[in-house]
């Protein structure tokens, strides 16, 4: 008999959601391997996933007990959980009584498990009476959510990874899956190797590693995506390469879209995008010849001042060609975090309600409020991620509870976020490790359990729900996030939080979804543990899950048809370039780091790939500034500066520079925090920040 005990779980990094077998030896030492039976990764893991056990094993940075400042300006001291919870409840009660429920807020994370997300929302929206619950998923997915809702009637990814092996044309737009969703990319790569006629179009201002398998790389100028997709749409319409029957029977608004494109000139579009007319025609031709066409996109579209419009314009291509609601075809947004989708299922954003119900709909608010048995739910949308920190800075928001995220490094305009945290009356940070720079500003610091130290569920990018087993106990006095939240709710005197297990929370969530488009009332913990993962909806106890939506061509809109949405802005509304700040800064990820490096930063093996931040810059721009590869430069915007080494490259266009977003101010490199530079401009509908377009200047660093 093996001395190891094996537990099924899911990778805690990206939204691909790879299955992992965590093995525990008699001494409690954990090792990990890819789950060969998992439909997502079939045993494969990328470098981040295969090194997760190092993160678990190294406890040197863990927060082991609650710490509290007795008053501002004093050092935090160790306190008991009881003292910590009493203080949290006292502060929240005082703020709510004095300034109203909207004076407090929760800022959470796409790494939280679904049950934890559910509890935060129930607590804030159903009992405290504020919709001030937002998440770092606002920074990655909110533009796609709005795009789906407008076109398909609901935030619903139509297809699955299994469609990859059925498609013969992919458009990878504003994403670098080779580095950011590696196992998904391996599947595309393997599919192309087996089927060399498969065509791959990559749209990206940089020539990334994903371009290695591309038949066509459209290296557009940042922010010009809508112009490109509209030009392709125009070409498809003019050449009659559209699916007339699908458009006539299953869509609305085609004539309006056609009219809006009437004056679109391919040569003008090519000029704006910085590419050739030939390439636009080639893209249209590859799409029109496809039997199965999949669009895959991520932050390059979503993180923009016109992120929703970019989504609309890309979705229109799937609708024009009828490539939706059939195997091997469809739009497929990629989530950056492991449970961004699960969070949305339980209403984990300031403008959402649980079970995909609508905050603006009075009937929905009443249904959810009655289900919870708490207060009436306010119709007023809460503060979104950036609004929450603006409100802390202005003093409108008094207390914030930050769970499992590091806004000091991940939010745009980081110096402003720092001021906001300094100005807040009370900051609670609930996290696993001191590696989060945000812990520095905590008045109350709560130690949380990490991956494999607690139980719960997550949903990956393809609507697949998996159960994560608890394998080991958390260190010190750390507690599972769900437990911390229900203990707080009880201290506040709220009924309905008398859970004994996270399974009870999960059951309640499932019951609330009954009859909705995301119905998971047929999916119990015992099914998840016994039968494996399932894709929602799973409405009955013997339902096999749903790998594809809209096979009946019935969409979730008022008419049942998918809608062409005319992108309102075709010009970027991002920050203007000036003589002082003439370069476009775009930020993103590198292969072996994740988010703000609170986990990947402590794994030596992951530091061998790219150990330090760098600024990728075109060789001509570097030459004009007398900069060579490896020189230290100062990058400056209106909001701040960083010092960073230059990487001279011909993979990036002139006028554009790239800086990874992972490095913070306190840990690693003191000067590499990309968000010192980024703008606070957000998309007006999705409120997602524009991390892909900030005006900067770069100059040689001169020692003072
Ligand atoms: Fe984890 Fe994503 Fe890598 Fe899979 S692809 S192992 S989910 S980081």
Image: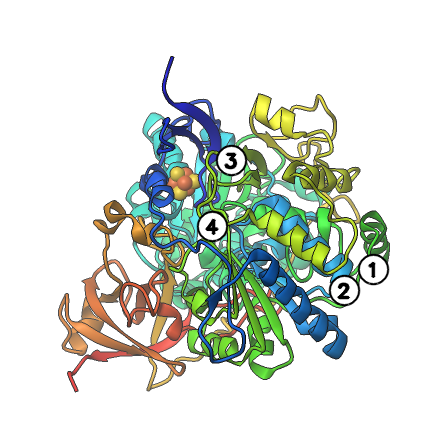
Contact between marks 2 and 4 (CB within 8 A): the answer is no
Q: Which residue is mark 2?
A: 129
Tag 3 secondary structure: loop
The residue sitting at the top extreme is: 1
Separation of disc 2 and disc 3 at Cα? 33 Å
Q: Which residue is mark 3?
A: 470
Tag 1 secondary structure: loop
Labelled disc at residue 67: none
* Sequence-first tag of 4 and 3: 4
Which residue is drawn at the image coordinates 73% and 70% (left, top)? 101
Q: Which residue is mark 1?
A: 375
Q: Nearer the viewer, residue 380 or 503?
A: 503
Task: State the image quarter where residue 41 is shown.
Answer: top left
Separation of disc 1 and disc 2 at Cα? 7 Å
Looking at the rendered image, the disc whose residue lies closer to the viewer, 2 or 4, is: 2
Labelled disc at residue 336: 4
* Sequence-first tag of 2 and 3: 2
Looking at the rendered image, the disc whose residue lies closer to the viewer, 4 or 1, is: 1
Task: State the image quarter where residue 256 is shown.
Answer: bottom right
Contact between marks 1 and 2 (CB within 8 A): the answer is yes
* Sequence-first tag of 1 and 2: 2
Contact between marks 4 and 3 (CB within 8 A): the answer is no
Separation of disc 2 and disc 4 at Cα? 30 Å
Measured from the top left, where is residue 671 in percent x and y? 28, 72
Which residue is drawn at the image coordinates 39% and 27% (left, top)? 43
Separation of disc 4 and disc 1 at Cα? 34 Å
Separation of disc 1 and disc 3 at Cα? 33 Å
Measured from the top left, where is residue 189 in percent x and y? 35, 35
């Amino acid at each position: 008999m093996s001395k190891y005990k094996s537990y099924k779980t899911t990778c805690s990094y990206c939204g691909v959601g790879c299955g992992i077998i965590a093995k525990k030896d008699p001494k409690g030492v954990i090792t990990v391997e890819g789950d060969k039976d998992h439909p997502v990764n079939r045993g494969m893991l990328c470098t981040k996933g295969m090194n997760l056990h190092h993160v678990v094993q190294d406890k040197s940075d863990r927060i082991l007990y609650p710490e509290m400042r007795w008053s501002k300006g004093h050092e935090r001291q160790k306190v008991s959980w009881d003292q910590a919870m009493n203080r949290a409840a006292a502060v929240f009660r005082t703020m709510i009584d004095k300034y109203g429920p909207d004076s407090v807020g929760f800022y959470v994370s796409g790494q939280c498990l679904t049950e934890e997300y559910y509890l935060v929302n129930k607590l804030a929206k159903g009992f405290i009476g504020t919709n001030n619950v937002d998440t770092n998923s606002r920074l990655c997915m909110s533009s796609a959510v709005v795009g789906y809702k407008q076109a398909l009637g609901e935030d619903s990814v139509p297809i699955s990874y299994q469609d990859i092996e059925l498609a013969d044309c992919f458009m990878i737009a504003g994403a670098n899956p080779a580095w950011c969703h590696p196992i998904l990319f391996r599947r595309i790569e393997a599919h192309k190797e087996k089927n060399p006629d498969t065509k791959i179009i990559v749209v990206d201002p940089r020539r990334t590693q994903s371009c290695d398998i591309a038949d066509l790389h459209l290296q557009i100028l940042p922010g010009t995506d809508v112009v490109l997709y509209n030009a392709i749409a125009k070409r498809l319409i003019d050449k009659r390469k559209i699916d007339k029957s699908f458009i006539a029977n299953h869509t609305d608004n085609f004539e309006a879209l056609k009219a809006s494109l009437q004056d679109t000139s391919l040569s003008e579009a090519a000029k704006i995008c910085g590419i050739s007319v030939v390439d636009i025609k080639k893209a249209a031709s590859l799409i029109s010849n496809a039997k199965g066409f999949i669009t895959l996109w991520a932050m390059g579209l979503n993180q923009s001042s016109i992120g929703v419009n970019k989504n609309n314009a890309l979705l229109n291509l799937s609708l024009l060609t009828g490539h939706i609601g059939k195997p091997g075809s469809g739009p497929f947004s990629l989530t950056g975090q492991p449970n961004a989708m699960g969070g949305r299922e339980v209403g984990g954003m300031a403008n959402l309600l649980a079970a995909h119900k609508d905050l603006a709909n009075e009937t929905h608010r009443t249904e959810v409020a009655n289900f919870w048995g708490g207060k009436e739910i306010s119709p007023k949308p809460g503060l979104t991620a950036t609004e929450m920190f603006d409100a802390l800075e202005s003093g409108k928001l008094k207390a914030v509870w930050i769970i499992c995220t590091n806004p000091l490094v991940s939010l745009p305009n980081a110096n402003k976020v720092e001021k906001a945290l300094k100005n807040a009356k009370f900051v609670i940070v609930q996290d696993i490790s001191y590696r989060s720079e945000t812990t520095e500003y905590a008045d109350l610091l709560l130690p949380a359990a990490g991956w494999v130290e607690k139980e719960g569920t997550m949903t990956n990018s393809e609507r697949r729900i998996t159960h994560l087993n608890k394998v080991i106990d958390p260190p010190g006095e750390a507690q599972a996030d769900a437990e911390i939240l229900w203990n707080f709710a009880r201290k506040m005197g709220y009924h309905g939080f008398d859970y004994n297990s996270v399974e009870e929370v999960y059951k309640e969530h499932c019951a609330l979804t009954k009859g909705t488009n995301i119905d998971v009332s047929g999916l119990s913990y015992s099914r998840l543990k016994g039968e494996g993962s399932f894709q929602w909806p799973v409405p009955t106890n013997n339902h096999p899950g749903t790998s594809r939506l809209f096979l009946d061509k019935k969409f979730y809109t008022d008419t049942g048809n998918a809608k062409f949405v005319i992108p309102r802005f075709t010009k970027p509304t991002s920050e203007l370039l000036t003589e002082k700040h003439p370069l476009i800064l775009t930020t993103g990820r590198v292969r072996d780091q994740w988010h703000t490096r609170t986990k990947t930063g402590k794994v030596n093996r992951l530091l061998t790939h790219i150990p330090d931040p760098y600024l990728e810059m075109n060789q001509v721009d570097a030459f004009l500034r007398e900069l060579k590869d490896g020189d230290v430069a100062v990058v400056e915007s209106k909001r701040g500066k960083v010092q960073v080494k230059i990487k001279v490259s011909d993979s990036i266009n002139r006028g554009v520079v790239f800086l990874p977003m992972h490095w913070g101010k306190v840990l690693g490199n003191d000067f590499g925090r990309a968000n010192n530079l980024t703008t606070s401009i957000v998309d007006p509908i999705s409120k997602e920040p524009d991390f892909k377009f900030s005006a900067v200047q770069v100059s040689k660093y001169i020692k003072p």
